[in-house]
C-alpha cells in the first residue's frame, strides 16, 4: 500500500535535485563568462525552479497539512533534502559547471521521458512540460562539453579534470530508495536502475565526440538520497534559507 | 488540478479576457497568447484555467491577479487555477497574436523544422521585424526571457527578439 508520505518522499527525490541545481545555477546570475552563457544559465535555473514549484505545490497539497511550496523549499533540515550529491557540488570553474549540468541533464531527460507515463496524472503532466525544457538544457550542456573538449589544450584539460572529479557522483542517480521502490510498484514511479545503460551510452557518445574519456572509477559516492550530504550543502542551504529563517513567513 | 483536456471558453467571457495582457509582451492579450484553457461561469463565479508558457514563467502569478482584477472591474468574482497538461505550444498563438508580435518588434515563431535550422543550423530565415530582411543572425539562443532568442539584422543592424518555437 502506498501512503501519501511515500509519494511525498518520492517527489522530493526528484524535485530536490531541480531545486538545488537551480540554486547553484542562480549563483551565476551576473557572473557568466559571456552574456549568452549568463542568460542561458539563469534561464535554465528558472526552468528548474519552475518545475520545482509544480512538484512542491503537489507535495504540499498531499501532506494534508497547511503547508505551502515555500515551507517545503525553505523550512526543511539538511537531512530532509533528498537530492543527489552531484547537484550540490560547487561552481568550481566553468568546466565543472558544464560537466555537472551535462551529467544531470542526461539523467533528467531519461527520467522525465519515463515519468510522463506515470499513473499519477500530476506527475505525468509535470514531466511532459519538463521534457521540452530539459531537452534544451541537454543540448546546451552537450554543445559546451564538445566545444571545451575540442577547444584549446587548456580547456580540454580542465573539462577532462571536471569529468574525472564528478563522475564518481553519477552512480547515485540510479540508486532506488525504499520510497522509489514503493512508487514503482504502484505505477507512479520510474525504475531508475534500468536507465543506467542508456545513460552511460549517451554520456560516452558525447564525451568521445569531444575527445574526452570516461574515467574508470571503481568507487562511487552516495548518501544524498538518504539525506547525508557533502559539506557544501550546509553553505548552500544557509544561503537558500536565510530570508525565511530570519524573517519567518516573509513575502515579497 | 493539473489537466484540462478540452479547451472550453464561454464566448460571453472573451471580451473581458481580451483585456488582460501578457505583462512581458503588453501588445499580446492572453487570448491571443493561447494560455487560457477554459473559462466558465459556475454558481456566479467565473472559473478560469490558464497554462504556463514555461514552467518557471514569472508572468503567470501576475497574470492570475490581472484576470481576477479584470473581472472585479465588472463586479464579477473570478477564480484562476493553473493547468499543466496538455503543455502549451507556440502553435496556440493566434494569427492575430503573431501579427501583434511582429508589429511590436518580436519575430514570430517559425515551424519546428525551420526553427531548428534557424537556431542550430545558422540558416538565414528569421525575418527582421523592422525592415523585413531575412539576412539576420542569431546572437544568443536565450534572450530577454526564456521563450525568446536574441537576433540581429545584418541589413538594418537592429537587434531583435525571436519568439522560439515550442512544441
Ligand atoms: Zn532589419
Image (cartoon, helix red, strand yellow):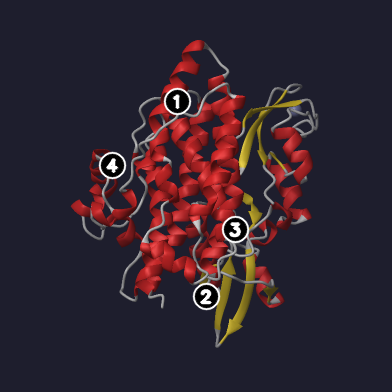
Q: Residue at x 57, y 85 (%)?
A: B42
Residue that numbered label 2 is attached to: B78
Q: Which numbered disc covers residue A128?
A: 3
Residue that numbered label 4 is attached to: A236
Residue that numbered label 1 is attached to: A95
Circle 2 SS class: strand
State which quarter of the image contains the N terminus of chain A. bottom left
Respond yes or no on whether mark 2 lies under 8 Å from ligand 1. Answer: no
State which quarter of the image contains the C terminus of chain A. bottom left
Neighbor class of circle 4 (other Cα within 10 Å; few <14, some 14-19, many 20+) is some
Q: Give the mark count.
A: 4
Name the foreground residue: B13 vs A235. Answer: A235
Q: Relative to residue A224, is residue A214 drawn left or right?
A: right
Which is in the foreground here, disc 2 or disc 1? 1
Marks 3 and 2 share the same chain: no
Protein chain holding label 1? A
Alpha carbon distance from label 3 to label 2: 28 Å
Q: Residue A198's spot in the image, x, y percent?
A: 58, 45
Q: Residue A142's spot in the image, x, y percent?
A: 57, 33
Circle 4 SS class: helix
Name the foreground residue: B15 vs A88. Answer: A88
Q: Relative to residue A198, is residue A162 drawn left or right?
A: left
Which is in the foreground here, disc 4 or disc 2? 4
Residue B25 visible in the current orientation = no
Which numbered disc, 3 or 4, marks the residue that appears first in the sequence? 3
Amino acid at each position: 500500500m502506498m501512503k501519501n508520505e511515500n509519494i511525498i518522499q518520492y517527489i522530493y527525490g526528484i524535485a530536490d535535485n531541480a531545486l538545488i541545481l537551480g540554486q547553484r545555477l542562480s549563483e551565476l546570475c551576473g557572473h557568466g563568462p559571456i552574456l549568452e552563457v549568463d542568460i542561458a544559465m539563469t534561464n535554465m535555473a528558472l526552468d528548474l525552479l519552475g518545475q520545482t514549484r509544480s512538484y512542491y505545490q503537489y507535495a504540499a497539497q498531499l501532506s494534508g497539512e497547511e503547508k505551502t511550496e515555500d515551507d517545503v523549499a525553505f523550512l526543511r533540515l539538511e537531512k530532509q533534502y533528498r537530492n543527489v550529491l552531484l547537484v550540490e557540488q560547487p561552481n568550481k570553474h566553468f568546466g565543472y559547471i558544464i560537466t555537472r549540468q551535462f551529467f544531470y541533464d542526461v539523467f533528467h531527460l531519461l527520467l522525465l521521458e519515463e515519468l510522463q507515463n506515470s499513473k499519477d496524472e500530476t506527475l505525468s503532466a509535470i514531466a511532459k512540460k519538463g521534457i521540452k525544457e530539459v531537452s534544451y538544457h541537454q543540448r546546451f550542456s552537450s554543445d559546451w562539453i564538445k566545444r571545451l573538449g575540442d577547444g584549446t589544450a587548456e580547456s580540454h584539460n580542465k573539462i577532462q579534470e571536471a569529468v574525472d572529479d564528478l563522475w564518481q557522483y553519477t552512480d547515485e542517480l540510479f540508486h532506488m530508495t525504499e520510497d522509489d521502490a514503493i512508487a514503482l510498484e504502484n505505477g507512479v514511479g520510474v525504475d531508475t536502475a534500468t536507465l543506467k545503460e542508456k545513460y552511460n551510452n549517451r554520456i560516452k557518445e558525447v564525451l568521445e565526440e569531444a575527445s574526452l574519456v570516461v574515467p574508470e572509477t571503481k568507487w562511487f559516492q552516495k548518501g544524498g538520497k538518504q539525506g547525508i550530504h557533502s559539506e557544501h550543502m550546509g553553505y548552500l542551504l544557509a544561503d537558500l534559507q536565510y530570508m525565511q529563517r530570519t524573517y519567518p513567513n516573509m513575502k515579497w | 488540478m493539473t489537466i484540462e483536456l478540452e479547451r472550453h471558453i464561454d464566448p460571453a467571457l472573451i471580451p473581458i479576457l481580451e483585456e488582460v495582457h501578457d505583462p512581458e509582451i503588453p501588445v499580446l492579450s492572453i487570448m491571443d497568447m493561447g494560455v487560457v484553457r477554459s473559462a466558465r461561469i459556475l454558481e456566479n463565479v467565473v472559473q478560469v484555467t490558464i497554462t504556463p508558457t514555461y514552467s518557471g514563467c514569472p508572468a503567470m502569478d501576475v497574470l492570475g491577479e490581472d484576470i481576477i482584477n479584470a473581472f472585479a472591474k465588472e463586479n464579477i468574482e473570478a477564480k484562476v487555477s493553473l493547468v499543466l497538461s496538455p503543455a502549451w505550444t507556440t502553435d496556440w498563438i493566434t494569427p492575430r497574436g503573431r501579427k501583434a508580435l511582429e508589429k511590436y518588434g518580436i519575430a514570430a515563431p517559425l515551424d519546428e523544422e525551420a526553427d531548428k535550422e534557424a537556431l542550430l543550423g545558422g540558416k538565414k530565415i528569421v525575418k527582421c521585424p523592422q525592415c523585413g530582411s531575412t539576412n539576420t543572425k542569431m546572437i544568443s539562443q536565450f534572450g530577454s526571457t526564456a521563450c525568446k532568442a536574441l537576433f540581429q539584422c545584418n541589413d538594418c543592424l537592429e537587434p531583435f527578439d525571436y519568439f522560439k518555437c515550442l512544441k
